[in-house]
């Protein structure tokens, strides 16, 4: 029996995780998989319940699980706290503690949503890319960091640090991923001004020699940001550092039409996977049953692929989502410009995906 830890978190997190769990249970049953669930707080919910953004007990439960499904963390209720006590620190600590150095963020276009983006349909048709983001190094974790008063002026400092081992292992993830796709890797960097990026280029080139069947190109991050919205079909696998990957994968929301459609998987060497939607906690719509659960449901599909060894279930989940969208069902964030279709809520969207899963049996 595979143990799944649920960390709903804050804002709309509990709503979207609830729908994703229903889909996870149904698809697992169809595949003959047996799952056991535990639920724990993280982020602001953990601060309110336990006084800190994540507890040692939750980290222990995560290490004992096959996979972790997370909703979202953060919100204005905790913005007054010092940076090391805010909800986001719980997520960063979870990633670091589990050694989840590889973040996979796919962005593909469902045919029914070609009009949902502000980009022209002919630019988007056929787009299917994967951002492979290094997740446990770089400027988010580098030392020294902090704020100080220097010569009477406030100063803040963050440090971007990577070593060759960190770079090589994330590069291998990108090249292995490309082998299962269209065999093309775009390494995104800023080597014209950053020594860290210069080391990235050197090490990525070294790793590439072991993958002669995969084409590699190096691309400056600023031009990549432009090309991602101008010609997204040119990309297969995008390999990049923590900071650049964070920004570019959110920009990829332009491809899908909504952050509510972007899933992610965070993987490491310990065999545990963390699955979460790319969107935030959206506290302004929390509790209103209007959130889009599809990114979290699609994260479940990634869980079946990477942690539960059930690729047929992943195909079934994605097929159900595709069918529901093709039938014209939309949450508010997916409504096309000028469209007058009646929108549905979070729970209703989960119901429809479950119904489509049932038809596929």
Image (cartoon, rainbow, N blue to C red):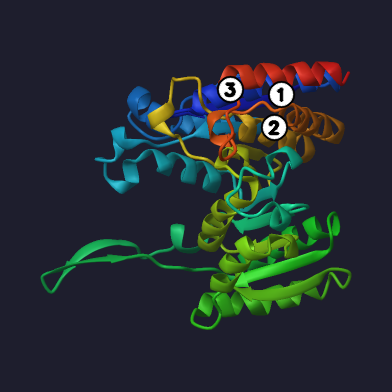
Figure quadrant of residue 234: bottom right
Q: Give the alpha-carbon distance from disc 2 to disc 1, as whole Å.
A: 6 Å
Give the mark toward the camera: 2 or 3.
Answer: 3
Give above or below for 65 relative to 280.
above
Decide which of tag 2 and tag 1 comes sooner along the chain.
1
Contact between labelled residues 1 and 2, with CB atoms less than 8 Å apart? yes
In the orientation shown, which residue stands out farthest toward the left? 152
Residue 37 appears in the picture as rendered = no
x%, y% of residue 161? 49, 68
Decide which of tag 3 and tag 1 comes sooner along the chain.
1
Please identify the quadrant where the C terminus is shown. top right
Please tell me which residue is depicted at 67% across the width and 16% down the height of the picture. 351
Please tell me which residue is depicted at 62% across the width and 69% down the height of the picture. 188
Between 82 and 26, the one nearer to me in the picture = 26
Q: Which disc is residue 24 wearing?
A: 1
Please tell me which residue is depicted at 62% across the width and 32% down the height of the picture. 296
Label 3 Cα crowd, 10 Å radius (few <14 / some 14-19 / many 20+): few
Tell me the residue that label 3 is attached to.
Answer: 342
Figure quadrant of residue 74: top left
Give above or below for 117 relative to 167.
above
Figure quadrant of residue 226: bottom right
Tell me the residue that label 2 is attached to.
Answer: 300
Between 199 and 133, the one nearer to me in the picture = 133
x%, y% of residue 265? 66, 43
Say which element carries label 1: helix
Decide which of tag 2 and tag 3 comes sooner along the chain.
2
């Amino acid at each position: 029996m595979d143990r799944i830890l649920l960390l709903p978190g804050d804002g709309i997190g509990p709503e979207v995780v609830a729908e994703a769990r229903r889909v996870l249970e149904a698809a697992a049953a169809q595949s003959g998989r047996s799952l056991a669930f535990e639920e724990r707080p993280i982020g602001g919910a953990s601060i309110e319940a336990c006084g800190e953004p994540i507890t040692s007990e939750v980290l222990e439960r995560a290490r004992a699980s096959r996979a972790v499904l997370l909703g979202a963390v953060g919100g204005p209720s905790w913005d007054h706290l010092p940076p090391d006590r805010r909800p986001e620190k719980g997520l960063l600590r979870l990633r670091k503690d589990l050694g989840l150095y590889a973040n996979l963020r796919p962005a593909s276009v469902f045919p029914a949503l070609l009009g949902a983006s502000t980009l022209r349909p002919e630019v988007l048709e056929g787009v299917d890319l994967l951002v492979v983001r290094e997740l446990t190094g770089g400027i988010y974790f580098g030392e020294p960091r902090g704020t100080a008063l220097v010569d009477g002026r406030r100063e803040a400092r963050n440090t971007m640090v990577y070593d060759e081992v960190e770079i090589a292992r994330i590069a291998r993830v990108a090249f292995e991923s490309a082998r299962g796709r269209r065999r093309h890797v775009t390494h995104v960097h800023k080597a014209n001004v950053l020594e860290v990026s210069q080391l990235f280029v050197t090490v990525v080139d070294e790793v590439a020699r072991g993958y002669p069947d995969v084409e590699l190109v190096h691309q400056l991050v600023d031009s990549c940001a432009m090309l991602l919205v101008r010609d997204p079909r040119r990309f297969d696998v995008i390999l990049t550092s923590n900071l650049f990957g964070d920004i570019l994968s959110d920009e990829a929301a332009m491809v899908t039409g909504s952050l509510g459609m972007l899933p992610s998987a965070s993987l490491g060497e310990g065999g545990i996977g963390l699955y979460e939607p790319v969107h935030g906690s959206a506290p302004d719509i929390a509790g209103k049953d209007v959130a889009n659960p599809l990114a979290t449901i699609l994260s479940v599909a990634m869980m079946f692929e990477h942690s539960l060894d059930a690729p047929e279930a992943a195909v079934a989940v994605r097929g159900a989502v595709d069918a529901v969208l093709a039938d014209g069902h939309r949450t508010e964030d997916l409504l096309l410009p000028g469209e007058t279709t009646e929108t549905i809520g979070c729970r209703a969207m989960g119901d429809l995906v479950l119904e489509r899963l049932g038809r596929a049996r």
